Image (cartoon, rainbow, N blue to C red):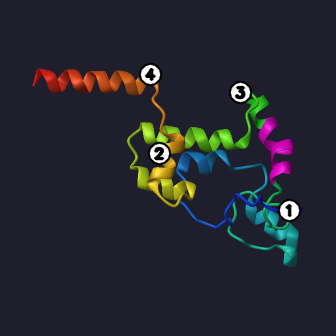
Amino acid sequence: MSWPSKRRRARVARSRPAPPRSTRSVVTERSKAEERLRAGTSWDDQGLIFTTAIGTPLDAGALLRRTHYQLLKRAGLPRVNFHALRYTAATLLLAAGTHSRVVAERLGHTTPSVTLSVYRHVTPTMQREATATLDAVLRA
């Protein structure tokens, strides 16, 4: 068992709606209903998407070794840590104009300023959009 570092705050369970495309891609060969039936009274229903065979949370290390890296390899993607997916999702949401408060809540940040200081970096697309916006304002 590993303990969180002193720097990390206590983890708080949170629930966020998942977009249909991401939930469809999570579907596996075995449905959750079949897993529950196999587990019988041992099933611990915590409302999780990714679980062990008895419904409990997956061990992060095991998830990376057994699933995450294999899926990346099968998809022809580079081997990146799981946190990179979080970083990518946050960056894409912010770049698409999602309000920083919403992104902060999805990430479990206490304030949008935390989110913006970590995830808001300038991409080439943002630079082009800023240039086009400035041009449009100056022409008006």
Give, as a three-letter code, the residue at label 3: Leu
The percent position of residue 108, horizontal first and vertical second, equals 56, 59
Q: Nearer the viewer, mark 4 or mark 2?
A: 2
Name the residue beneath numbered marker 4: 124
* Left or right relative to 71: residue 101: left
Q: Residue at position x 85%, y 62% from top?
A: 53
Give, as a three-letter code, the residue at label 4: Pro
Name the residue beneath numbered marker 3: 77
Q: Nearer the viewer, mark 1 or mark 2?
A: 2
State which quadrant residue 9 falls in.
bottom right
Q: Residue at position x 90%, y 62% from top?
A: 1
Residue 119, compared with residue 30, is above or below; it is above
Name the residue beneath numbered marker 1: 53
Measure the alpha-carbon separation of dots 4 and 3: 22 Å
Q: Residue at position x 74%, y 49% from top?
A: 28
Measure the alpha-carbon separation of dots 1 and 2: 38 Å
User: Does 71 appear in magenta?
Assistant: no
Residue 86, compared with residue 106, is above or below; it is above
Q: Secondary structure at mark 1?
A: loop
Numbered range of the magenta stretch: 60-70
Measure the alpha-carbon separation of dots 1 and 3: 28 Å
* Left or right relative to 110: residue 49: right
Q: Secondary structure at mark 3?
A: loop
Name the residue beneath numbered marker 2: 116
